[in-house]
Amino acid sequence: MVAAVYFWKQTPFIRLLLPLIIGIILQWYCQLPTVLWSILIAFSLILQTVFSLFSFFRRYRLAWLAGLGVILLFISIGALLTWFHDIRHDKKWLGNYYAGNDAIIVSLDEPLVEKAKSLKANASVHYVVSKDMAQKVSGKIIVYFKKDSISPAIGYGSGIILKKPLQEIKNSGNPGEFDYKRFCLFQDITHQVYLKPGEYAVIDTGDKKDLNGFLYSIRDKVLDILRTGIKGDKESGLAEALLIGYKDDLDKTLVQSYSNTGVVHIIAISGMHLALIYWLINLLLNPLGKWKRVKWIKPVLAISILWSFSLLTGASASVLRAAVMFTFIILAESFSGKSNIYNTLAASAFCLLCYNPYWLWDVGFQLSYAAVLSIVIFQGPVYNLFYFKNKLLDQAWKMNAVTFAAQILTTPLSIYHFHQFPVYFFLTNFIAVPLSSIIVLGEILLCAVSFIPSLAMIVGRALSWLIGLMNSYVERIESLPGFLWDGLQINILQAIMLFVLIIGISSWLLGKIKRGLLLALASLLGFVTLRSLSFIDAKRQQKLIVYNVPQRQAIDFIDSRNCLFFGDADLQADEFTRNFHLKPSRVLNRVAPVITMNDFVANGNYAIFGNRKILMIDTTIIFCAQSEKMLIDLLIISKNPKLYFSSLTNTFNIRQVVFDGAVPFWKLTYWKKDCDSLHIPYHDVSEKGAFVMPLN
């Protein structure tokens, strides 16, 4: 108890961080009025003022009251930060002024990125032009340019005027999918547009002499050095991601291999990379620390280099978290003070969430903090489990102990977000982590000697070989039987219970706290109960899902834990598209694909499933009028068949129509009008998201 009180006093930022997080979550999910939070802030300040007027003895007895005031204050601050960071609450937000026929003036915020069929860039909107009047606005959009038709003068900072209607960013609406709309909104992006030649005009080539332009120019130089020195598309793509976080050239199958084997974290610029940079800085600047007169230069240079590297890599949440944390550590060391690592972590998280509260939902942010915290807590106990006299074996075990420790608190998050657990993560990390560290240092060396072609060539070849070795090792681990537990599904409450289970067991084993065991058993019971109920529900389910997959037909007939797919064969063969659109739904519903299903009877385009009569039309079919109309519970129309609803209604009595993602937009307009005139309910998946019909 005394230790807990001491820890609580030594970590003031934890006491501030927790209510800040509560306020952020409350505001995002409840969208409460700012007046409420303003009143709470005023109440908290009044409470603190009145409390300060009390006598010392009374303040001691009513300390909880002061604590309550601080909690309410920072809950309100977190909520207000969340409200003000929502671009939709900005009076100048483009959505408040833009109409579909208005012109807009934008500037590109980044260099163009090449996609499969287009060139993409984020852009800031500056003006909405309507009736010869320009209204200054704020907000961002995603601009796609048609490939091979864009002027080479367009790049970072280019000013463009366009009049093509913007499309609001929407989710596809498929069950279990990634919330792309929220992801974009957290970056102030709410609309997108696809531009062809003649649909825009360049009004400014852009002033690239600002800080971002300078950083992009450095990044381009680094990319040019890496692409020249490191041979092989897979090797150079991975090298770019490892050093500066540039992921546009990464091979998708290689990324999947790294993800499946539990080492995808080394691709993302994170604390590990900044730790290497920090170690290298200390090594190079160590002589400065020996002279008192210039001792101050070392922390200034170290912090400057760390932040320059962070900005160069794109300033992601994980990089900024590490940069803030190392900044705190450097400052603490400079002032000869000892910092509490838990307080340092909480302070860095507090600063980052004040800067951008939406980073709370960033998966990299969550995993980064979970990994560092897990290493701090568990690395020592895990390392002490085994003792090796041999120094080489001892160092090898120390590295593995770090890997095991990091996995403890990141496992619930990994399962919740990615629905998988890499079984052989320790084998992959054992080689990949130290090897990737050597590669990063080698890439820094390559950039340093790039002006000496012969030496750069030698370093480049060595790096190409090392990266190829790491890639082949990861791919071999992936080929081992049972390398991955896939399709794991837990909800947020189950994830919390896993964390409580870990905390309970840890406090029991490490802190000798008996209540920890009771807490762990209670959370385990709750987890097993919730998971069992979810499996019972999955066993009883029977439903039909028409997915929203652009230009594809995709239908799942779900019965119990099985699903029967009906749709385009090439969608089944396209692993990336299948994993993006279909897999999240199948994981959510706990189903696996089967070839046949007992409760599904099909005859051509006609099917009976769960006592429902379903007609699927994707080609032109002529139906004869019937004296007695056949009842159709669901009509699914796909692609571009030639049909008329007036003819269909002479043959069928249709209860519901669904238009899937493969239906051309121009035909939807006519068919929707027909449905409205015939009073037939319809569902357009491209507009409303996937159609889900429960059958029990």
Image (spheres, rainbow, N blue to C red):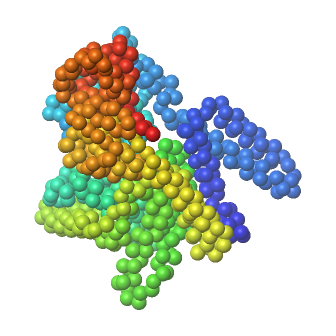
Q: Position of residue 73 (x, y in %)?
A: 67, 43
Residue under the point 48% across and 49% down: 537
Residue 14 in sight in this render: yes
Whether 284 is drawn above or below 383: the answer is above
In the displayed structure image, the side of residue 591 where residue 38 appears, left or right: right
Residue 181: x %, y % from top left? 40, 36
Residue ID at (38%, 86%): 391
For the view shown, which residue lies furthest in the left direction? 454
Answer with the quarter of the image where residue 600 lies.
top left
In the rendered view of the protein, which quadrant contains the C terminus?
top left
Looking at the image, the residue that sits furthest to the bottom is: 389
Could you tell me which residue is drawn at 31 percent across and 24 percent down?
630
Q: Is residue 174 visible?
A: no
Q: Is residue 195 above or below residue 269?
A: above
Q: Residue furthest top?
A: 131
Task: Report x, y in % for residue 222.
Answer: 24, 53
Coordinates of residue 693 in the picture (x, y in percent): 40, 35
Name the one closer to the observer, 415 or 395. 415
Q: Nearer the viewer, residue 681 or 244?
A: 681
All told, the count of numbered labels is 0
Residue that appears at 68% across and 62% down: 9
Q: Quadrant of the N terminus?
A: bottom right
Q: Is residue 52 left or right of residue 552?
A: right
